[in-house]
């Protein structure tokens, strides 16, 4: 019966979500009413098993099954209803914030761990599903790339992302997926339920911001830091200052901002936000290619030996670092080199911007500034410094800061598509017939040409993996505004010296 499942959830919430003994009767009655149950379950339960659960998966499945079988909720309603129930079992936002602040005073890492664990235990982060994602590391001579196929992330179109900045504020509630108004939101057909979401208020340079975790968890402790008000992303002195302010408060986390332009930016351009977490990306392991002469001895500036065009700044002096960073940002926004297809703007439409990332190692701030440009032309209508058409079968979306730092988030469709392509070659199937039945496999022309060149009996699984690895590397190289050929290297060095850092 459903009331037994409700009682199990109360035991679980008491053990894992901080549901106080004093609040159990009240919470039980609220949930019983919502589930049209007239009395609680009074039988025996395996309390120790419930207290030992690491994730709520089996309880969520049991709840879902009984809600549908007992005609409490339909298939279309049940998922949002479960999120609502898990939100009721989770402490109120003010209680979560108070616990976070208490832990923060003693140990900052324990505070962020508390919030993460709470979001796993209340099923906002579906940890078991996340762990089903496919991931591996490329094996290149240097600068390996991490590759993941994220089975829960929807694939987005760059043109749809660009339209976000055009939606007038007030026409949609919540205005976007990042707004603070998502906390407790019931959800609808166009917007996910967020009853079990909890966010932490922060002050960044005296402005109100919030911290939450991403439900997709692209890397360890993947968090989102977003502004209180719904306004478009920008890259400015204020933006970079906020990144530095964040790592002062959370030195165990990195933080970065996606670029503020379509194609080279993130998927939510209409709300100012950062992404961070407790993770070291491949870009952060890259060596310096050369040091840039600096007039300020407090700041070391170098160019990274990395796939895209990246400055690396190191300093213990936050003010000096910020000044040097803004010289790079402003210098890049006005830089033009038509031979390299670098044009900073067309009329009033900006093309050049940056992706800034900050972390703290001991008392030193490390800032990475990736130069970006979102121009298009007839040859590359989706972006000159973007994944090119031959790459789109693997990745077509904008290359945000996560990919730019060397961790690729590839679409879920690839799991099925690449498996079928491997079977096509392993079992010598009829390709024409297969493509007629599976029309979305026609986009892999370049991969077919690669596999056709291999001898019969080749290790097609390995070959497909290598193809994906090389494609991701080529995409990163394509995003580089200064290519790694002699002309590109010389122009990059000339630009760096012209900044008079």
Image (cartoon, rainbow, N blue to C red):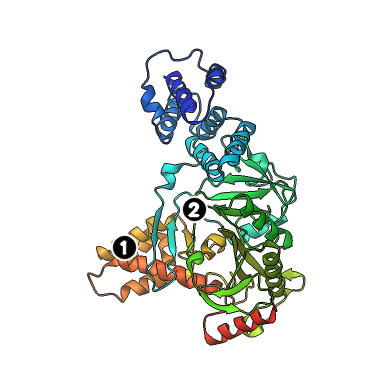
Tag of residue 25: none
Quarter placement of the C terminus: bottom right
Answer with left or right where residue 41 lies relative to residue 19. left
Is disc 1 in contact with disc 2, using a CB cutoff of under 8 Å? no
Q: Kindly state the secondary structure of the residue where label 2 is placed.
A: loop
Q: Hey, which residue is sitting farthest right in the picture?
A: 348
Label 1 to label 2: alpha-carbon separation: 26 Å
Query: Residue tagged by mark 1?
Result: 422
Q: Position of residue 60 (x, y in %)?
A: 44, 32
Picture coordinates of residue 368, whole percent (x, y): 59, 66
Placement of the N terminus among the 4 image quadrants: top left
Which residue shows up at 57% across the image and 28% down it?
Answer: 88
Q: Quadrant of residue 369?
A: bottom right
Q: Secondary structure at mark 1?
A: helix
Can you give x and y, in whole percent of width and height, for residue 161 in the image?
62, 57
Figure check: 426 above or below 377:
above
Instruction: Categorize mark 1 by other alpha carbons within 10 Å: few (<14), some (14-19), many (20+).
Output: some
Q: Nearer the viewer, residue 169 or 441?
A: 169
Mark count: 2
Residue 414 lies, with reference to residue 377, above or below; the image says: above
Q: Earlier in the sequence, mark 1 or mark 2?
A: 2
Residue 471 in the figure: left or right of residue 479: left
Q: Is residue 389 among the parts visible in the rendering?
A: no
Considering depth in this image, is 297 or 429 the residue closer to the camera?
A: 297
Residue 437 at what x, y percent from top left?
A: 37, 58
Q: Which picture quadrant has residue 442?
A: bottom left
Q: Is residue 366 visible?
A: yes
Question: What crowding class fits label 2: few (fewer than 14 Cα within 10 Å), some (14-19), or many (20 or more)?
Answer: many
Disc ID at residue 218: 2
């Amino acid at each position: 019966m459903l009331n037994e499942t409700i009682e199990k959830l109360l035991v679980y919430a008491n053990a894992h979500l901080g549901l106080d003994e004093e609040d159990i009767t009240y919470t039980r009655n609220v949930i019983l009413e919502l589930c049209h149950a007239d009395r609680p379950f009074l039988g025996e339960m395996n309390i120790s098993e419930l207290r030992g659960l690491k994730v709520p998966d089996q309880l969520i499945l049991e709840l879902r099954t009984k809600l549908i079988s007992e005609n409490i909720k339909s298939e279309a309603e049940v998922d949002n209803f479960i999120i609502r129930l898990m939100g009721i079992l989770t402490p109120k936002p003010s209680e979560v914030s108070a616990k976070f602040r208490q832990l923060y005073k003693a140990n900052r890492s324990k505070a962020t761990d508390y919030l993460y664990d709470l979001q796993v235990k209340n099923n906002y982060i579906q940890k078991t599903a996340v762990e089903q994602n496919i991931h591996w590391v490329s094996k290149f001579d240097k600068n390996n790339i991490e590759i993941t196929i994220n089975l829960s992330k929807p694939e987005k179109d760059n043109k749809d992302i660009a339209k976000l900045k055009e939606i007038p504020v007030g026409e949609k509630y919540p205005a976007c997926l990042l707004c603070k108004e998502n906390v407790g939101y019931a959800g609808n057909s166009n917007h996910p339920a967020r009853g079990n979401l909890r966010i932490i208020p922060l002050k960044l340079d005296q402005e109100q911001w919030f911290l939450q975790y991403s439900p997709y968890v692209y890397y360890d402790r993947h968090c989102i830091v977003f502004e209180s008000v719904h306004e478009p992303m920008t890259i400015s002195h204020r933006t970079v200052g906020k990144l530095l302010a964040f790592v002062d408060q959370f030195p165990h986390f990195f933080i970065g901002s996606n670029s503020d332009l379509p194609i080279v930016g993130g998927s939510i351009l209409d709300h100012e936000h950062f992404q961070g977490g407790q993770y070291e990306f491949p870009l952060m392991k890259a060596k310096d290619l050369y040091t840039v002469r600096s007039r300020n001895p407090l700041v070391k500036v170098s160019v990274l030996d990395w796939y895209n065009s990246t400055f690396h700044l190191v300093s213990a002096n936050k003010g000096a670092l910020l000044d040097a960073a803004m010289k790079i940002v402003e210098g890049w926004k006005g830089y033009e080199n038509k031979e390299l297809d670098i044009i900073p703007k067309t009329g009033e439409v900006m093309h050049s911007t940056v992706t800034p990332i900050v972390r703290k190692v001991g008392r030193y701030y490390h800032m990475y500034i990736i130069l970006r440009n979102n121009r298009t032309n007839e040859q590359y209508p989706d972006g000159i410094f973007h994944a090119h058409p031959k790459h789109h079968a693997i990745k077509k979306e904008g290359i945000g800061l996560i990919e730019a730092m060397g961790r690729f988030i590839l679409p879920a469709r690839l799991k099925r598509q690449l498996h079928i392509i491997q079977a096509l070659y392993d079992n010598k199937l009829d390709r024409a017939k297969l493509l007629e039945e599976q029309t979305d496999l026609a986009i892999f022309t370049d991969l077919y040409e690669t596999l056709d060149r291999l001898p019969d009996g080749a290790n097609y699984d390995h070959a497909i993996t290598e193809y994906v690895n090389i494609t991701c590397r080529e995409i990163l190289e394509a995003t580089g505004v200064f290519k790694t050929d002699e002309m590109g290297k010389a122009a990059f060095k000339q630009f760096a010296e012209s900044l008079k850092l």
